[in-house]
Amino acid sequence: MYAEGVAMGDLARIYGTPLYVYSKKTVLRHIRAYKEAFRDFRHIVCYALKANTNGEIIRLLAKEGAGGDIVSGGELFRGLRAGIPANKIVYAGVGKTEEEIRLSLKKKILMFNVESAEELKEINRVAQEMGVKAPIALRVNPDIDPKSHPYISTGMKEHKFGIPIEDALEYYKAAARMKNIEVVGVHKHIGSQLTELAPFVEALSRVLLLIERLEENGIRLKYLDLGGGLGIPYKEGDDPPNPEDLAAKLRPLLKNRARELTLILEPGRSIVGSAGVLITRCLYLKKTSERNFVIIDAGMNDLMRPTLYGSHHEILPVIKSPRRASIKADVVGPICESGDFLARGRELRGVKEGELLAVMSAGAYGMSMSSNYNSRPRAAEVLVDGKKHRLIRRRETYRDLVRGEM
């Protein structure tokens, strides 16, 4: 198995395992697909940093003209440090602190995506103390089921995110009366790993009706933030929509708004998810009366998604050996938890102790959600560019585990 022009086995030998490997060409191809799909509209592709916060990945995207979709002061710091201009950064999230609001106003970000009346008042108060106006959009909750996992669904009434769309007009009127608030946009994001476009279209239709009502009340917007959420293929046979599919569905709805509104897109997973692989080594093969276990050196601290979401990642041998028999096994890590697994009841061909496995589609919410649980140093990250490769995050050491302790 190769990453661009480099054998995965060579990378594992040089950098060790567990190891995150990313393809530069794939990252660039995906960001360019969004830019091309929405070429008929003024738009900013604001990469969702939470998907993968490695500075070199963010730098690649910043050089392609991407902005940033952030949800914390730390992501603001990372985005600016990697070269994303502040005026291309939008800030979402339900729990912005006073310190984070101040820093964002100081850096002059594009806008806050406001999630509650209380947050709106706090942003206005902080802006007043600083003697500035805060640019805001309201994140509206259109009550649309995105048909994805409940933990990554964000656009229904039961969720903590956003303002009910039926109440949004009154919230906008209140915002327009605040002396230190500048109303500039509207935002919606209904969830992640969307594999159908109908929920996206329905949500946008409701938001466009809201924009009409706002205009009737003298409130005109500059930005329409469509959110993100396009899914990626995690298993054989998956065929999620791509950016061009999305643009084709939305174009008829947006054609009358192209002159007055700048679109903001917030892709994360669909940029980096399929661009990354987690390489791990088989430590032991264990057989009990109940089942087989493939015990690997990557655990739930390295890739949390299977434990957290029950998500599927294809697991493939780095070196194929078709003559070997397949086994049905749980692929588990070294963490002292029964929930530490990367796959359950998976058919695997020809696994032997000491061999390398590739956990596919691991570029999003892999390293960014990793932890030091069980005092395990976090994995290294490598970027491949053709036949070249380089370390973009070194493997942590035991000393890194206690750095900062007093």
Image: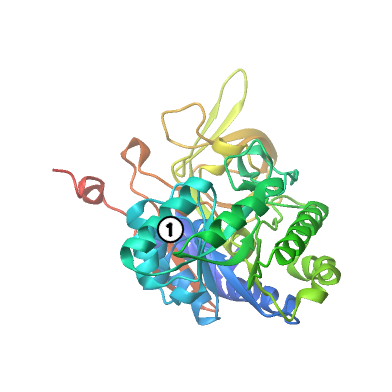
Q: Is residue 114 visible?
A: yes
Q: Is residue 55 left or right of residue 209?
A: left
Out of 310 and 50, give the one closest to the viewer.
50
Image position, residue 176 (x, y; %): 56, 62
Q: Is residue 405 left or right of residue 309?
A: left
Q: Identity of the amino acid at label 1?
A: Asn
Q: Residue furthest top?
A: 289
Count up the numbered dots. Answer: 1
Q: Quadrant of residue 253?
A: bottom right
Image position, residue 109 (x, y; %): 45, 70
Q: Which residue has dot 1 on it?
A: 124
> At x 39% / y 65%, what residue is drawn?
104
Question: Which quadrant does the N terminus fall into?
Answer: bottom right
Q: Is residue 16 visible?
A: no
Few, some or many residues within 10 Å of mark 1 (<14, 14–19, 20+): many
Residue 225 higher or lower than 200, as above or below: below
Residue 63 higher or lower than 277, as above or below: below
Q: Quadrant of residue 55?
A: bottom left
> At x 68% / y 80%, what residue is drawn?
42
Image position, residue 244 (x, y; %): 78, 71
